[in-house]
Amino acid sequence: MLRTVSARLSFTTVAQTKVAMAVAVAKNPGYTSFDEQLTVTSDGQPVPWRELVDGHGGRFQVLEFDYPSDVEVEYTASVRGRAVPETVDEMELIRYVRPSRYAESDRLLPTSYGQFGGMAGSPLVVAVRKWVHEQLSYVAGSSRGTDGAVETLLHRRGVCRDYAHLAIALLRAKDVPARLTAVYAPGLRPMDFHAVAEAYVDGAWHVIDPTGLASRYGMLRITAGRDSSDTAFLSTVGGSLVLRRLAVAADCDETLPDDDPEALAVVG
């Protein structure tokens, strides 16, 4: 399987702005070929950047701007093969069962137990995915960047990150380690960076996509973490910026199988 992805961004910064950007595909030893290119320019001139490695193969590119800047970013990657499962870290299983900023599992504990009773393991994961899918309506622009799982449940609508946060919170409330993964998703409509949930059951991490908007079998991981605060594709560490344009593309050279929401799958 060959997957080709790209991301093109334009943004404007104020002076003394430090940017952390996550658009690169996470590297995995299972890929048989991996070719990528990242260019960053400002007023036509190359902008230097350095890369920091996060967990789960994620990579953040760090850029610093002393003066107000109009920035253009272009990233392309061609990846062949399938990812192999990562080594399970016991500390991560503890971290990903705790409440977090956008996945308030402590506040949703009564809801989770009320809806899913004594369910556990893979049947619980499948049931949570189905329930979130049925309870929410996908409405572009309907949520704020500060909304977490509780607000999503109250409003009953959101975008992919909101679906993922709610599923993660409900799973953690029942002591299932769960995390958010940002991915490129061939076949996604509307095309964008996509967010899904991953749950640790049956001795491995498995992805669920409560939106049902793309096949999990074509997804490529970018980053993974507690929630979207760990996986944002563009954020500032001092200073500020305004995003002017974002265009994402993801394609696959094979016809992706229909996604069975009751089957477990991995990102790769």
Image (cartoon, rainbow, N blue to C red):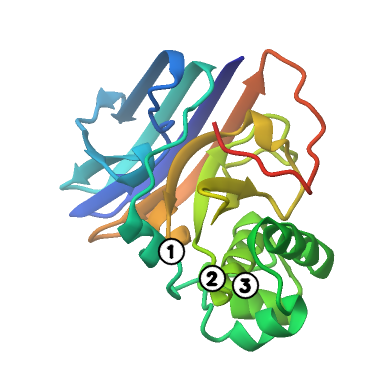
Residue 196 lies, in percent from the top left, at 60, 50
Secondary structure under tag 1 reads loop
Q: Which residue is mark 2?
A: 172
Q: Callout 2 environment at 10 Å: few (<14), some (14 to 19), or many (20+)? A: many
Which is nearer the eye, 263 or 227? 263
Numbered disc 2: secondary structure? helix
Residue type at the position of mark 1: Tyr
Q: Kindly check if marks 2 and 1 are in contact, taking CB atoms under 8 A apart as contact.
A: yes
Can residue 21 be seen here? The reply is no
| Gap between marks 2 and 1 measured at Cα | 7 Å
Residue 121 lies, with reference to residue 55, above or below; the image says below
Placement of 134 over or under 234, stated as above or below: below
Q: Residue 31's x, y, as percent?
A: 45, 18
Q: Give me the disc on residue 96.
A: 1
User: For residue 216, what is the image quadrant?
Assistant: top right
- Quadrant in the rendering for residue 150: bottom right
> Is residue 120 in view?
yes
